[in-house]
Amino acid sequence: MSDPLPWERGPQPAPREPGLSVDLRRCIGCHACSIACKTAHELPLGEFRLRVRWLPRPGGNQLAFVPLFAESCDLGAAARAHGLAPECVRACPTEALRYGERAEEDSPLRRFEAAEQAQPFGGKAATHAAITYVGLEPWIPGAVGKGVPLDPSDPDPIYEQGGAS
């Protein structure tokens, strides 16, 4: 038997200090998280709180997929009020997004972050303070350009063609 669905478990206590960790090793660049966020918050075309950047890796033909969160991200406050994880976390097919309690030193999220050496995203495109990244290579912060805001000059795919002004 599979794990119970969120509504079958009943409400879960909301974290006192919610946090999110992005495992870049697991992200496949599918945009499910950004679409779930955009849908949940009814954001207009061209506006994002979460955007997955496709970045060419140095010296190769491979891409790095990097979900970036805007400072306006509320970590799914509406979902949390009902005992659910944020929409982006629930939508991720690879479990690249982990959500949990940050206030408790021994919480599963904090243990994961410590074991995997999670770190905040820095640089010009610094994102939400409650979000850490696993597998963040040194070249990535300098390669994201403007970060979350939509920019027509960005080379990565955008599923909202014509949405930028």
Image (cartoon, grey):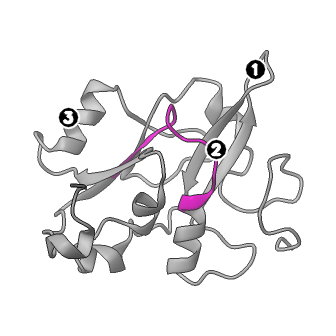
Instruction: Tell which of 59 and 61 is nearer to you.
Output: 61
- Tag 3: residue type? Arg
Q: Which residue is identified by label 1?
A: 58
Q: Is residue 24 magenta?
A: yes
Q: Is residue 2 left or right of residue 145?
A: left
Instruction: Tell which of 39 and 47 is nearer to you.
Output: 39
The part of the image, by quadrant, that contains residue 81 is bottom left
- Tag 1: residue type? Pro
Q: Nearer the viewer, mark 1 or mark 2?
A: 1
Instruction: Tell which of 164 and 34 is nearer to you.
Output: 34
State how far apart marks 3 and 2 are (Cα): 28 Å
Say what secondary structure mark 2 lies in. loop
Say what secondary structure mark 1 lies in. loop
Q: Could you classify mark 1 by the number of other residues whose Cα lies within 10 Å: few (under 14), some (14-19), or many (20 or more)?
A: few
Residue at 59% across / 39% down in the picture?
Answer: 123
Tag 3 and tag 1, C-beta contact below 8 Å? no
Q: Which residue is identified by label 2?
A: 124
Q: Which residue is identified by label 3?
A: 111
Label 1 vs 2, first from the N-terminus: 1
Residue at 69% across / 82% down in the picture?
Answer: 44
Q: Position of residue 133 (x, y in %)?
A: 44, 38
Magenta segment range? 20-33
Label count reads 3
State how far apart marks 3 and 1 are (Cα): 31 Å
Q: Nearer the viewer, mark 3 or mark 2?
A: 3
- Tag 2: residue type? Lys
Label 3 vs 1, first from the N-terminus: 1
The part of the image, by quadrant, that contains residue 7 is bottom left
Say what secondary structure mark 3 lies in. helix
Q: Position of residue 72 (x, y in %)?
A: 50, 69
Label 3 vs 2, first from the N-terminus: 3
The part of the image, by quadrant, that contains residue 2 is bottom left
